[in-house]
Amino acid sequence: MAKQIILLLGGARSGKSRYAQQLAGQLGNKVLFVATGEALDEEMQARIAEHRKNRPESWRTLEIPTGIGRAIEKGIGNAEVVLIDCLTLLISNLLHDKPDYLEAEKRVMSEINEFIAVMGKLDASFVIVSNEVGMGLVPETRLGRIYRDMLGKANQLLASHVTEVYLMVACLPVKIKG
């Protein structure tokens, strides 16, 4: 099967992760799961534990909050498919120290461009999960608005470099590119 790069967008609990795992399993047997979430509180610890439980045991996992391009390049091994879950938390991790807009944009674009370059070098297929956050209310806080804008920019940049894009709605994939 030819190399595929698939971006899955959707809201919270839209079925993105479940569908991403299904796609990854269809694309290859040797999967590297890249988890960007950090267990900073009890709720996230429980969510991460649930995600781990739902993944096939044969998949390798790389837990990395930022710098995913370099980490994937070093840790790819014999993986045929790389599943990133999720870009939403990756962008949040880049904004932990509340940078100003221009610094946030610099960090996010650097991270995503590095990741795109690594995807271009590797022979594996990729499945990338991200939230679509631009359809709701304007966030009340400055940091919330920066986050929304940065995730939107990251999604746009990635969408221009992938072979397929799906919007997940109630666990139903709606193909919008490819």
Image: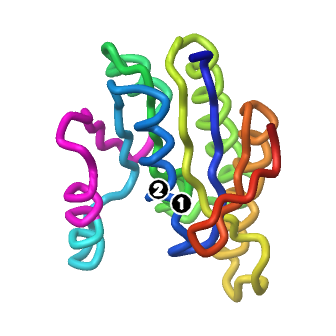
- Location of the C terminus (image quadrant): top right
Q: Which residue is mark 1?
A: 16
Residue at 29% across / 60% down in the picture?
A: 51
Q: Which residue is mark 2?
A: 93
Residue 62 or 54: which is nearer the viewer? 54
Q: Is residue 5 left or right of residue 54?
A: right
- Helix or strand or loop: what does disc 2 sit on? helix
Dot 2 crowding, Cα within 10 Å, few <14, some 14–19, many 20+: some
Please report the bounds of the magenta region as a residue range: 48-66
Residue 138 or 86: which is nearer the viewer? 86
Asked if the residue under mark 1 is in contact with the one under mark 2, i.e. CB atoms within 8 Å, the reply is no
Kind of residue at disc 1: Lys
Which color mode does the image show? rainbow
Q: Position of residue 54 (x, y in %)?
A: 26, 57
135 within the magenta span: no
Q: Tell me if residue 33 comes above or below residue 39 in the rendering.
A: above
Residue at 72% across / 73% down in the picture?
A: 145
Q: Position of residue 115 (x, y in %)?
A: 58, 29
Kind of residue at disc 2: Asn
57 within the magenta span: yes
Cα gap from disc 2 to disc 1, whole angstroms: 20 Å
